Image (tube, rainbow, N blue to C red):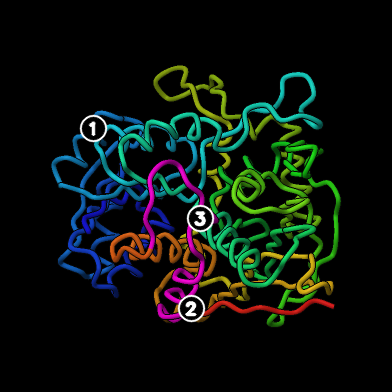
Amino acid sequence: MRVLLVGAGGVGTAVTRIAARRDFLTHLVVADYDLTRARSAVDTAGDDRFSAIRLDASDEDAVRAALAEHRCDALLNATDPRFVMPLFRAALAAGTHYIDMAMSLSVPHAERPYEETGTKLGDDQFELAARWEGSDRLALVGMGVEPGLSDVFARYAADELFDDIEEIGVRDGANLTVEGYDFAPSFSIWTTIEECLNPPVVYEAGRGWYTTAPFSEPEVFDFPEGIGPVECVNVEHEEVLLIPRWVDSKRVTFKYGLGDDFIAKLKTLHELGLDSTAPVTVKGPDGPVAVSPRDVVAACLPDPAGLGDRMTGKTCAGTWVKGSKDGAPREVYLYHVVDNAWSMAEYGSQAVVWQTAINPVVALELLANGAWSGSGVLGPEALPPRPFLDLLTEYGSPWAMREQG
């Protein structure tokens, strides 16, 4: 399989380090707007099957040309969500498969943002589903860890663990700390602001999708492997938009363990308008310059990819499922934990970006060997879960399940 990887940041670099240990790739082209960064990702992987090019992810024609020039079978999108649609359309035009880890952006309801959905995450992609089906190519959307592995867990629970599901709730928590920083997010602050300050979406059978206020419905969830109790709150996330399309559940939620201090800082950014993506004009050395406040925030914070040496603790991604099996109530938590000390020692990547990166690599291998196949715009829960979970374990990163109650 020949793959174009667009984005050589923390997740993209981790992808190269993971993929270098697998033999299903014949060639991986690592593309980034910053050629130096693309070359660095290739160099750290140390694999002669990999090459680096400069590419603007917003330039559909250039992306399509790169896919054709390098005879790629698939495009793996490791950029932030702003570039989903140009890359998605370029892959469709080029006749290649497509995988991303975050879906097209939402737009809140103009009048009732905390009650009704506007444009939902992924809506722009699903609008092109018929064209993808007609091309006989697969756009596998939301194939990171959350969304991604969490959706695979939902499908597995529905197929093998439950007869009837009352609620599927993705729950994410960690006990990670970063030495020397009062505020150092372990993942892209651009994406974190987007998902945390947008109206969270909840799904209920009979009602459909609706929204609530940011950070609503707090609950304390006890995470495994020593992480312990963490307060989690509603956050906008793709699983709530994906899981109900293929898995029967009376309710679907996503809650993230952020902590009071993190939430307070995000609220302050919002109150000051520093979460905005609309350019503002500021003074520059050669005259007025238009900049996005959110991009300024990102530039002022440390690069998450470079925090691994200062980071300690574990991160947990998982799916809590409540329902019944053989007439008896059942409640389980399927989860995946990564210890930062292990991921740094084994791969040189911090835990959060490594945990995100491994899942699309597993998916690419399943597409390459035929265990996964399909056409159209599909989420991970539309495909058989067992091959994915078995291969994830083969990669040396096993998942686990805890009976609740």
The residue lying toward the viewer, choosing from 310 and 35, is: 35
The residue lying toward the viewer, choosing from 82 and 164, is: 164
**391 inside magenta stretch:** yes
Q: Position of residue 45 (x, y in %)?
A: 27, 68
Which amino acid type corresponds to the residue marked 2 in the rendered image? Answer: Ser
Residue, disc 2: 397
Residue 319 appears left or right of 137: right
Residue 262 appears left or right of 15: right
Q: Which mark is residue 380?
A: 3
The segment highlighted magenta reads 372-397
Which of the two labelled residues, at mark 3 and mark 1, occupies the earlier sequence position?
1
Residue 116 appears left or right of 6: right
- The residue sitting at 41% across, 80% down in the picture is 394
Quick check: can you spot residue 180? no
Q: Position of residue 376 (x, y in %)?
A: 41, 41
Which amino acid type corresponds to the residue marked 1 in the rendered image? Answer: Ala
Mark 2 residue crowding within 10 angstroms, few (<14) / some (14–19) / many (20+): some
- Up the image or down, 285 lies above or below 164; here it is above
Q: Which mark is residue 62?
A: 1
Mark 1 residue crowding within 10 angstroms, few (<14) / some (14–19) / many (20+): some
Which of the two labelled residues, at mark 2 and mark 1, occupies the earlier sequence position?
1
- The residue sitting at 44% across, 81% down in the picture is 396
- Up the image or down, 106 lies above or below 358; here it is above
